Amino acid sequence: MKKFLTLSLLVCAACTTLRNTSTVRNAATLAPSGKEQPKEMVLNQGSKATGAGRKGVAFNHETHSLMKYSADGKSVIGCAECHHTDAPAGTLKGEFTTDDGRKVKFTTSERNAVLTTALLAAPAAAPVKGCRECHAREGEKPAGWPKMPELPNPDGDPDPIPITNVEAYHDNCNTCHKQAKKLNPASRAPNSCAECHNK
Ligand code: HEC
Ligand code: HEC
Ligand code: HEC
Ligand code: HEC
């Protein structure tokens, strides 16, 4: 009996280790920037928020970057659609309409070629910065950018809009997911707080 218990404990320990090292890379283990593409991950770790946004958010980087995950389900999303600073200024995506209807032009470029898997494999290629390196949490200073990114307020308000992690990730994820659901009601793209914040 004792032997059996020890054995099953050992097996269990092995499977937890496997899960942690080979399939799940999450914000706790993911370096702020890196060259290894994550697979399944949990975003929003260590949140101090209260309410609907406090829980972690599952994000499968592998399906989103390798399978046909465009809103219409017809194409693979280019890396720089999400990693928008990883492309030369001249090739940046034109006008982007945010979740709340603002028109935004991407102008910031940190890479002189469009990010691809092949490009990243080159030893000299710079690592990819995680979004939160620039889009810090409210009240925090970004580690990878001089200050919180901001954009002019379209309502004529002289105060610019800070693009915190909430703005940036929500606009990225939600704008596409809303469109995906509209084009295909059977889409599994999550659109409510609890569908995303449940980890
Ligand atoms: C749908 C949006 C999306 C697409 C498409 C996408 N990524 Fe990502 N990527 C992310 C997010 C979100 C993270 C996690 C960043 C974070 O923790 O803030 C990430 C993280 C990464 C990381 C790890 C950075 C680190 O901190 O270690 C690398 C490397 C990366 N992506 C490369 C790529 C490459 C190469 C492609 C194209 C083949 C790609 N990504 C496509 C959204 C995307
Ligand atoms: C498509 C998935 C998705 C949906 C839908 C969503 N969120 Fe989020 N949310 C995220 C991601 C991703 C982050 C940022 C993760 C990070 O910084 O690592 C985030 C961050 C947040 C944060 C900031 C937490 C912190 O401590 O930095 C709050 C607050 C939040 N969400 C609230 C909400 C609320 C309220 C709703 C519903 C009205 C909602 N979210 C809907 C994915 C989602
Ligand atoms: C090197 C810093 C940097 C990194 C890394 C970065 N951003 Fe941004 N982001 C900015 C700046 C600066 C702007 C303002 C527009 C511009 O200058 O191009 C912006 C604007 C945006 C906007 C449009 C503005 C809005 O209000 O919605 C979205 C969406 C966004 N970023 C999402 C992301 C996501 C998702 C990631 C990670 C996959 C990411 N960003 C990584 C600096 C960064
Ligand atoms: C450009 C489009 C696009 C962007 C950007 C995007 N998604 Fe998705 N996502 C999709 C589509 C399309 C599906 C549904 C696929 C299906 O029905 O099989 C999906 C599905 C999902 C699912 C369900 C499980 C899965 O992987 O299929 C989760 C969770 C999810 N997305 C989280 C996120 C988060 C969090 C972000 C932002 C960091 C994000 N997505 C950004 C297009 C996108």
Image (spheres, rainbow, N blue to C red):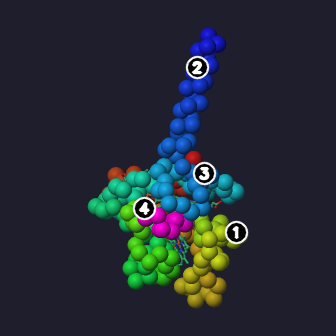
Residue type indicated by callout 3: Thr
Q: Residue furthest top?
A: 1
The spot of residue 135 in percent (x, y) is 60, 70
Identity of the residue drawn at 54% across and 85% down: 154
Residue position for label 2: 7
Residue type indicated by callout 1: Glu
CA distance separating discs 4 and 1? 32 Å
CA distance separating discs 4 and 3? 21 Å
Does 102 sit above or below residue 49?
below
State which quarter of the image contains the N terminus: top right
- The disc at residue 140 is 1
Q: Is residue 123 magenta?
A: yes
Identity of the residue drawn at 69% across and 71% down: 141
Q: Residues within 10 Å of mark 1 (few under 14, many from 20)?
A: few
- Look at the numbered discs 1 and 2 and tell me whether their residues touch, using CB distance below 8 Å: no
Identity of the residue drawn at 57% across and 51% down: 26
Give the mark toward the camera: 4 or 1: 4
Give the mark toward the camera: 1 or 2: 2
Q: Earlier in the sequence, mark 2 or mark 3?
A: 2
Q: Earlier in the sequence, mark 4 or mark 3?
A: 3
- Look at the numbered discs 4 and 2 and tell me whether their residues touch, using CB distance below 8 Å: no
Q: How many marks?
A: 4
Residue position for label 3: 29
CA distance separating discs 1 and 3? 20 Å
- The disc at residue 121 is 4
Residue 190 visible in the picture: no
Q: Residues within 10 Å of mark 2 (few under 14, many from 20)?
A: few
Q: Residues within 10 Å of mark 4 (few under 14, many from 20)?
A: few
**Mark 3 secondary-structure assignment:** loop
User: What's drawn in magenta, residue-wise?
Assistant: 121-130
**Mark 4 secondary-structure assignment:** helix
Identity of the residue drawn at 40% across and 72% down: 114
